Amino acid sequence: MTVVTVVYLDSVFMLNSLMDYLLLLGTARLAGIPLRRLRYALSAVGGGLYAAAVFLPGMEFLAESPVKLAAGVLLAAVAFGGEAHLLRLTLLLFAVSCALAGCVLGLGLVAGGGVPAVNGIFYTDVDARTLLVAATAAYVVLAVIFRAAARHGLRGELLRTEVCLRGKSVRLTALRDTGTSLADPVSGQPVLVVSRGALDPLLPAAVKRLMTERSLCLPADLLEPLRQAASDLRFYLLPYRAVGVQGGLLLAVRSDWTDVEGRRYPGLSVALSPTELGTAYHALWGGQAGRRGRYEQELGAAAASAGKAGAAEK
């Protein structure tokens, strides 16, 4: 007796698009790169279309392993194209995909009935809830485990950071570095140090062309050309000291504002490192972070204002 499997292409497309989006989002979070959700959604839609195409008459070859591999590489290129270490991100995507698929299948079996799949492509015509719950739970478990492992390996804390210049902002991942004592000589505020290229989405093309790795190593020679290319950007030279270095200069720019884990610093200085700072993060931060700190700052400012008012009355 022949068993006929009924597959609904709309279910295949929706479920696999969701799975691919979770995979791409999880990979980006684990790698500590700025999240580009629109690109991940576009790539996930492509993955959903590929999964649906596998079930079309005459398209069975799409389920072959080499084609699957090529499709995975293409999805990674769409989602992460332009990022540093694209090959590492692609390999991480495949690793997360394998882990997530195992978790989904395991959780589906525990839930009872398993998760229907043909040639490695998830489909369902009965219970979509099982697959959705399993996929979401697996994503949460993987994110918690791998992020905890990453933080332990870095011996630091990864912080969500956002920098705003000229009314536009970019999200970064910063490593809390308690050994960093770099501070603005005028305001005394800590300085966010970012990798070369981290602020590129916010900078004019003329400025980006000037900011090569070699030129950033000689910031004194770079300062005047930058001011001519973008006079509205407040570039300046920031002195610093490091182990084994008598003294040096970093190119810095004063941001409109910088947010570190919910605490916003108006006019915070951002220094540009000539090289990359790490693979899981793109900035170093030695100051405070978090919403509690922001509220304390506001209360401190209010207290200071009240003190000044009281002194004026006297």
Image (cartoon, rainbow, N blue to C red):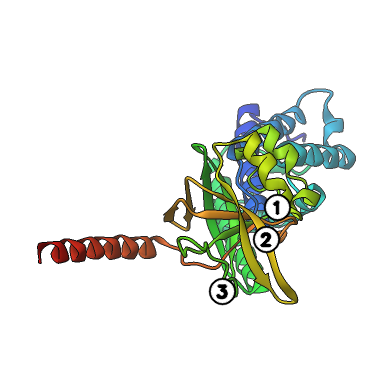
Instruction: Give the crowd class for mark 3: few <14, some 14-19, many >=20 residues within 10 Å.
Output: few
Assess whether mark 1 and mark 2 are in contact (beta carbons under 8 angstroms). yes
Q: Is residue 303 left or right of residue 173?
A: left
> Residue 48, how many percent across, how many down?
68, 33
Instruction: Give the crowd class for mark 1: few <14, some 14-19, many >=20 residues within 10 Å.
Output: some
Q: Quadrant of residue 7?
A: top right
For marks 3 and 1, the one nearer the N-term is: 3
In the picture, the quarter occupied by the C terminus is bottom left
The residue mark sitting in front, 3 or 2, is 2
For marks 2 and 1, the one nearer the N-term is: 1
Residue at screen point 78% across, 47% down = 86
In the image, 27 versus 273, the foreground residue is 273
Q: Residue furthest right?
A: 66
Q: CA distance from mark 3 to mark 2?
A: 21 Å
What kind of residue is marked 3?
Thr
Q: CA distance from mark 3 to mark 1?
A: 28 Å
> Residue 303, how many percent across, how many down?
23, 65
What kind of residue is marked 2?
Leu
Q: Quadrant of residue 102?
A: bottom right
In the image, which disc is placed on residue 56? none
Residue on which the image places disc 1:
220
**Vertical position of residue 177 compared to residue 39: above or below:** below
In the image, which disc is placed on residue 178? 3
Q: Secondary structure at mark 1?
A: helix
In the image, 312 versus 212, the foreground residue is 312
In the picture, the quarter occupied by the N terminus is top right
